[in-house]
Structure formats: C-alpha cells, structure tokens
Amino acid sequence: MAAVPAARAGASGWSAAAAVAPASIIVTIGIVLPIVILFRYSLNQYTPARMMVDAFSIENYAKFLTDPFYLSVLFRTIRVAALCTAICVVLAFPMAYCLARTRSRFKNLMLMAIILPLFVGNAVRAAGWMVLFGNRGFVNSILMGLGITREPLQIMYTEFAVVVGVIAVNLPFVVLTLQAVLEGIDRAIEEAALGLGADPWRTFRHVVLPLAMPGVIAGTILSFILAMNAYATPVLLGGPTFQMMAPTVYNQFAGLSNWPFGAAMAFILMTATLLLTVTSNWLAQSRYRRALVTPINVAGK
Amino acid sequence: MEKHSSDITRRRLMKAAGALAGVAAIGGWSPARAQAGGRIVLGTWGGDYSKLLSKNIDTPLMAPKKYEVVHDIGGDPERRAKMRAEARLPRGTSDLQGLSAAQMYEMNEAGLCLPIDYAKIPNAKYVLPQMRYPYGIGHIYSGKVILYNPKLIATPPTSFADALDSRHGGKLGIIDIQYQFTMMAAALASGGSMTDYEPGKARLMACRKAGAKILPTNEAMAQALQNEEVGICIMWKARAVQWQKAGAKVETVAPKEGIPLYISGFVIPKNAPNKDAAHVWLNEMLEPSAQEAFAEDMGYNASVTNAKIPPETEKRIGFNAEERKRLIDLDYGYLAKNDTALKEWWDKTFKG
C-alpha cells in the first residue's frame, strides 16, 4: 500500500523538476553565470593599454572602501533610496487602501491609471520631468509668472529632482503590491475593531497596518532595490554633479574601460543592496511577527 | 514515365543543391553576395552624423557599387568597449569604427586596429598630413574656440584665460563630457602644455567655486546658451556654427593660446569581417563631393585638400591664415596614458 503513494510522490517530484528546470537553466545562464564572470573580473587588475590583466587581487575592493569619494557616492545612493522608499510607502498606502476598499465601477480604470506610467520607459518619464524642472520649464514659468520668484529656481541637477523622479518610477510598484495585500484583508476585521470602540487611527495602527505588513515589506524591498539601482533618472535629472552608484559603475565600464574596478563597484552595490534589504526585512518581520500571526486567529481562519 | 521523369528531376535537384552547397562551402558564395559588393557594418555616433554618413557617402557613393552599409549606432565609450570585448574573436562584428583622433590612438595602442593599406585608397593622397595615421584616417575636423553671448559678456574674450575665468561666475558653462578639452584649455591658459594639464586644475577649481555651471552634454549647453542661462563656454567651432544657425546669439573667438584640433575619423578593427570593403568605404569617405557636403551640412572642415568648399562656407566654418597657424594637435600619447587619472580628478575633485 505504501508503494503507490511513494511512486506517486516520485512521479510528482520528476514533473516538478521538469517544470522548474527551464526557468532554472535560464536563471543560471542569464544571471548566475554573468555574476560569476563579473566577480572574476573584479579580482583582475586594470592597465590603460590592456584594459584588464589577469590577477587574483582585492585591490579594487580596497580602493573603493578606502576612497572617501566612492564611499560618499554609495552613502548618497543609500540615502536617496531610503528616502524615496519611505515617501513611496507613505504615499502608496492611502492610494492602495482606497483602491482595495472602493466599490466604484471605475475601479478598473483607477487601476489602469496606476499601471499606465509603467507603459512608459524611465528615460521618457525623466525627459518629462526635465520639461517641468528646467530653468525655463513649467514650474519655473508658473513661479515667475505668479511673481513668487524673480529668478528661476535651480531644480534640475539637484537631489530634489532625482528624488521626485525616482518616486514617480517606484510609486506604481508599491501601490500595486500594497493593494494586492489589502484586498486580501477581510473588511469584517476592521468593522469588528470599530464596533469594539476603536477609533479609525487605532484600527489602522493595530489592525490594518499589521495585517498589511507583508505588503509593506514587499513594497519596501521592491522600491529600495529599484532606487539603489536607478540609472536613467539620476543621469538625466541629477546631471553631472549628483553622482549615484549605477551611473558611476557604468562610467567605469564604458567611459574609462576600467572593467575590474567597475565589476568590483557592481558587486559592492549588489552586496550593500542585499544586506540592507535582508536586515530591514528581518527587523520588520521580528517587529511585527506577533501581529502577523494574531489577526489570523482573530479572524478565526 | 511520369515516375521516371519525376525521379530524374529529383536527382537533378539533389545534384544542383549539392553543387551549390559545395561552392558555398569553398568560397563563401551566396546569391546575395554575388549580386552585391558586400555588406559593411559601420560603428558610428547616432543623430545627424549617422544620417549625414548615409546621405553623403553610403547612398550616393557606396550603393551604386552594390555595397550595403549598416550603421551600428552607439556612443564611442560603448563601441570602444565592444572593440575590446571582441578583440579575442577571430571575426568581429564591425568593419569600421568612427572615433576621435585620441580614441583612434588609444585603440591602436591596445592593438585593436588594422594597419591601413593606403595603396587601396587612391583618395588618400589628398588627406591632410595631420589626419593620416598608420591605423586610421581623419574624416572631418574642427577646432576648440570660445563662444560668448555679447549681451551677457560685456568684454569680448580673446583667450582661454579670459573664458575660463572665475569672474564669469554662473555665466560660465562647462560641458561634462568635454573634460579632456576643458582641462587642456585650462592648462594652456595657466602656463601648462599639451603634455602637462596640471597647471589648469587650480583655474578650474576657482571657476567651479565661483558657480560655473556643469552641463552634461553638448546639447544641454546649446539649450543653456539659447536660454541665456550660460553666457560663455568653449566648444568646437563646427558646433558653434550649428548653434548660430539654430538661433543662438553667440560669437566665436579663436583663442590666442592656440586652437586645439578636434579630429574625427575611422579605424578598421583587426578582426573586421570585410576589410576590403572597409577600405573602399574609406576611399569614398575622402571623395571631394562627400567632404564638401559634410562641410556644408555639419560645419566641419574637410580633411582633404581637393575638396572645393564655397568661400562663404569656408569663412563661416574654417580658420583664416593667422588662425590656421595657431591650430595645435593634441598629444595623444599623453592623453592615453593619463586619461584615467584626468577623469578621476574631474569626477572626484572638480565635480565632487
């Protein structure tokens, strides 16, 4: 009798393996292999004439970690990514909540309005912001037209422009992630909290937010990773003087042909993103672990 | 009979196919190649330059000879990286690469360029000596001059020292991607030379502290001049002519320290698939008709002596006898050796 389930289990294991294999092969060839090659490059040495000389040296990593300029670029990138992510989550939550709770017949249209910006590439969107932020752009024309300012404000090529541009790119991703989770929260739970005398703020803080934490964490991770690796927006809106990691990595590869140092920088960016993401995820999970479990019991599911 | 006939037809077909395959395997023959002179993949910048290469060389001069020219469009950093990445391949993906003279030198130093066989390029005898290299040929040239808006800059500048001066404050514009020429101009203005850019650094830092605007690209500078956000900068004379045509109210001045040459040309990668066709293209590039059209359309000077540039165009884009004496070529060896250090200083200290 036990042989039949075992055979079934074996067959289902094989079919699962067959289903997973194509994606695994693509990931191995398309992601893992280039990363391994990139890591090998990062240990090589650079000479202007030969570009790359085979070596096993950590000097590229040491150069980055001991140079205040490159460290400042990394910390600036982390600061911008953290700021953009925080603003995205704060802005996205009410939007996602309204979308999840609305019974309007225009709900699909609202969702389309959120998704629509994703149809346009980052560079094109940044070009739109350039039209708005230029010294003779829309914002400055309005400010000067209304007599609020006499001289155009320098908005282009500033941190403000980059933050706005990155938020505009990331916001739809966070809204959609949160909306999917909020849709899954039973409305009866909120009604129960309100019925038991909790005011809307306490209901949000003690009921909705803890239940929505998986979405908040997923949205935060998504936004943070996107912002850490942003390229087009910092280049176009930050200009030459506001330097972030992804454009600096690109500059090492394409501008200076210094592939070993560019590869080391890419690895440092990847590692910093991974470490910060894992740490923040772990902190958030441990902070809300109890809250994530309790509401399921409350809901009686 | 029908069967017999059909069998013979099939045999004949098989024989014909076998013969075709054999010939193709031996000689690389294909019906398309038999009709055409060949296919050339040309690496070039996009925009106007690529369009004008098609308009003035590919279509009128190469197409009648049955050559198909395909443009591999990209910035020079990407195309140089591609040349380096393909260096180990026996067969590369491009037959020609458009680069500046400094970049041509750098690629040759890296051992990536095919020596030019000048015997295959009859038009090469007309090429200006400064633009004839063992590893490449100059296509067009211009010189670095000062651009200024008389409305914003009261005293006309005469030198790089006048232009790259902290007294201009935010009216001075500097183009990020022109870091080499900017550092060179600052060096010439501060007692440096083509082999020593160090003396210019203090001048540039003073300009930066005074509020000089750093703009990312040539196009951004054109817009800033048009909007009068910037009143003075340094740029190729050819670009100045284009911007004047577009309505920018700027004058040009040939600096008294010297006019650094900007030469744009082409090299043949060592592993180019169609080297003979690449030589044919280089010969057509030097045709007077093509050179005259580039001078008219793009404002760059011809690299050959037999092009007949209309006097009015020559006056607009060229340099007079006195100015021609001040044209100075770059030290490409110095640039190739120090480029990484120059760029690091630019990114970390000047912009940082």
Image (cartoon, coloured by chain):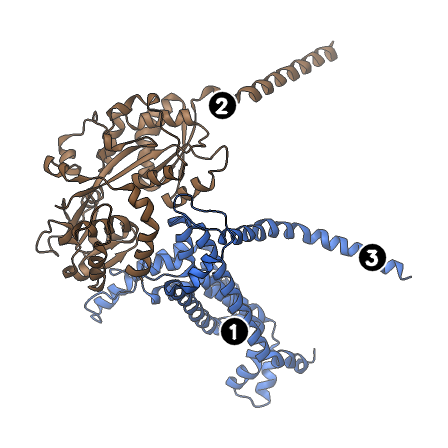
Q: Chain ID for label 1?
A: A
The residue to which callout 3 is attached is A8
Image position, residue B350 (x, y; %):
28, 59
Q: Residue at x 59, y 88 (%)?
A: A195
Residue drawn at (25%, 48%), measured in percent from left and top? B181
> In 3D space, how far apart are the residues under numbered discs 3 and 1 (Cα atoms)?
44 Å
At x 32% / y 49%, what residue is drawn?
A: B338
Q: What's the chain of the residue with tag 2?
A: B
* Residue placed furthest toward the left: B155
Amino acid type, residue under disc 1 in the picture: Tyr
- Expressed as whole percent of the image width and height from the top left, the position of residue B59 reads 34, 28
Q: Which chain is brown?
A: B
Q: Earlier in the sequence, mark 3 or mark 1?
A: 3
**How packed is label 2: few (under 14 Cα within 10 Å), some, or many (20 or more)?**
few
Q: Nearer the viewer, mark 1 or mark 2?
A: 2
Q: Colour of chain A?
A: blue
Label 1 sits on residue: A97
Of A55 and B18, which appears nearest the observer? A55
In the rendered structure, are the residues bearing label 2 and label 3 in contact, judged by CB atoms less than 8 Å apart? no
Instruction: Look at discs 3 and 1 and give the one toward the viewer.
Output: 3
Q: Position of residue A285 (x, y in %)?
A: 59, 75
Residue type beneath disc 3: Arg
Mark-to-mark CA distance, 1 and 2? 62 Å
Label 3 in the same subunit as label 1: yes
Report, in whole angstroms, how far the alpha carbon at label 2 lies from the one at label 3: 57 Å
Instruction: Please determine whether, in this image, residue B189 is positioned above or below residue A84.
Output: above
Residue placed at 42% from the left, 71% from the top? Answer: A83
The amino acid at mark 2 is Ala
Q: How many marks?
A: 3
Same chain? Circles 2 and 3: no
On residue B32, the disc is 2
